[in-house]
Amino acid sequence: MTPLSSKDIVAAAKRAATAARTLEAEINAADSRLGDGDTGTMLVRLLAAVEIIEPAQEDLGTTFRAMAMAAAESTGSSLGTLISAGLLSVGGLLAYRSEVQIDEIAALLTTARDEMLLLGRSELGDKTIVDGIHAVANAVQTQTTRQGASRAACDAADDVILYFRGKPCRVGRARLWPERSMDLDDPGMAAFARIVKAVGMPAS
Amino acid sequence: MKKLMNSPSSYVDESLLGLVLAYPDLVRSGKTGRTIVRRGGAIEGKVGIVTGGGSGHLPLFCGYLGDGLLDACAVGNVFEGPALQSCIDAIDAANSGEGVLLLFGNYGGDRMNFSMASKMANVKNIHTVLGTDDIASAGGHERDKRRGVAGIVLAFKAAGAAAQAGLQLEEVARIAQKTVDRTHTIGMAWSGCRLPSADQPVVSMTDGDVEMGIGIHGEQGIWRRPMAPADVLIEEMVGRILDDRQPQAPGTRVVLMLNNLGATPVDEIFIAYRRAHEILSGKGFAIARSFVGSFATSMEMAGISISVCFVDDEIEPLFSMPSSSPFWSIQ
């Protein structure tokens, strides 16, 4: 098993930021069918703030907290605030740790998931980004290698989108038109899937 | 580029810069400059009132800072909630030791950031009241899920007057909540608006259509149909408000607000006001105060909203107490 360091985490954030820039228009278009069409732009702004964090070599907790604060400063949107809260909760778990093992990722994602549910006053099944995180957390639970975790995460992030097709969004602005939301993917969940794939790409 | 701007990324900050240059009683403050405060700072002996929300709605939110109204405002990006730090800075700036009322619209990002900021600010005595006046955003059985729109301005006025009169935080919060509970708003628009960063409008409307119940971010309304005569549309709007009125808000006096959502000619606002006034009077309501103008906009959206607050003897006088702010003064 190759553990992850702060440097790996920031490198993953850079890949996510690059992916977000490529996907901005696509995510905006998806969001415009259920919201006000700016989720792609918000994610670009948030990840641009996060990717420039200096990795704290000996403390993953500091790295995640710095990412959370950068994210929080970049936006006050619902999704952005939830992401910030999730990063902060992970930072709390990793305080004073210089490395994290692959088989610990599931627990980190579960912590972020629970924090986001609490803050967003939502539940699993509401068809949000949190359902995507939940699916990925479950999928990587038994993985011990980067490659295995990456493959499992990508598959789970895609599968959960398919699972929720035909189901209505139950929170946020999209809940106001359940019939329409049944046929559309949640923009946050879809963006998460694309970013999981970008993060999972092997480092060049 | 279809907006008068230099770039999407500078839209909010350049707007705020202009605002504080034009109105020197307002100051940009806080670590990010996204907190607007009164030049004199918190007022000794007075409960502070803080609001916040996304840009794109001026005069909402930061246009209502001043005597008899609000003390600080956290400003978010266009149509986004205010970021955490600006909320913390606004709460701290408004506090003179008498506690702080947070009075903002019921939107996820705003709620989350103010909630976290409440725990992180250097103020222990904080109460929160959410604006929930948009009757089209959720049914009567889930009023707590409704969004806050133009009617929150009436809560600003009532709470601001109560704070100015020296009431304690609990009382100011109670009056704010009472005003919210008695205020009902519905919007209507016939053309949408465009985010600075977006190629497409937030809501696409066919020329000649009108949407009843649309939200201030373009949230889908109750129906969309071909445009109809003003009187027909206003009758439906006022009728929906009266149907939504809660039995625990009896009385026959109302405050009536006709709000321009951004691009409606003033003449047309008065055409709408005329009919709303006629309907309410015809049903036995006395119009205690009228407010007509741009109170909560949605950038270039062409449309209006109607807010009715069913007042009682306690809150009615608060709407006539003096107040002054860049966009709304009552002498």
Image (spheres, rainbow, N blue to C red):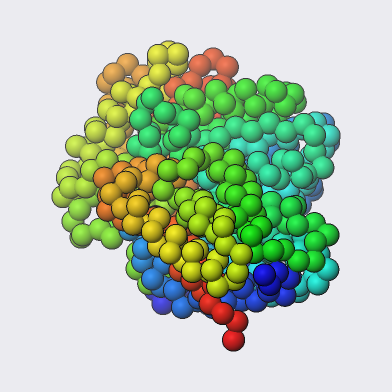
**Horizontal side, residue B197 vs residue B187: left or right:** right
For residue A99, side relative to residue B194 (left or right): right
Q: Specify whether B173 is left or right of A35.
A: right
Q: Is residue B314 visible?
A: yes
Number of numbered tags placed on the structure image: 0
Q: Residue at x 44, y 35 (%)?
A: B146
Nearer the observer, A118 or B326: A118
Write down the quadrant of residue A76 in the picture: bottom right
List x then y, in percent, for residue A36.
41, 58
Picture layout, residue B20 above or below residue B232? below
Looking at the picture, does residue B248 appear above or below residue B306?
above
| Position of the N terminus of chain B by quadrant | bottom left
Q: Position of residue A74 (x, y in %)?
A: 63, 63
Q: Name the residue nearer the viewer: A127 or B228.
A: A127
- Provide residue B291's location: percent of width, then percent of height: 45, 37
- Expressed as whole percent of the image width and height from the top left, the position of residue A181 reads 31, 50
Residue beneath the point at 25% across and 58% down: B205
Residue A160: image quadrant is: bottom left
Q: Nearer the viewer, residue B131 or B313?
A: B131
Residue that appears at 31% across and 53% down: A165
**Residue B29 appears in view:** no
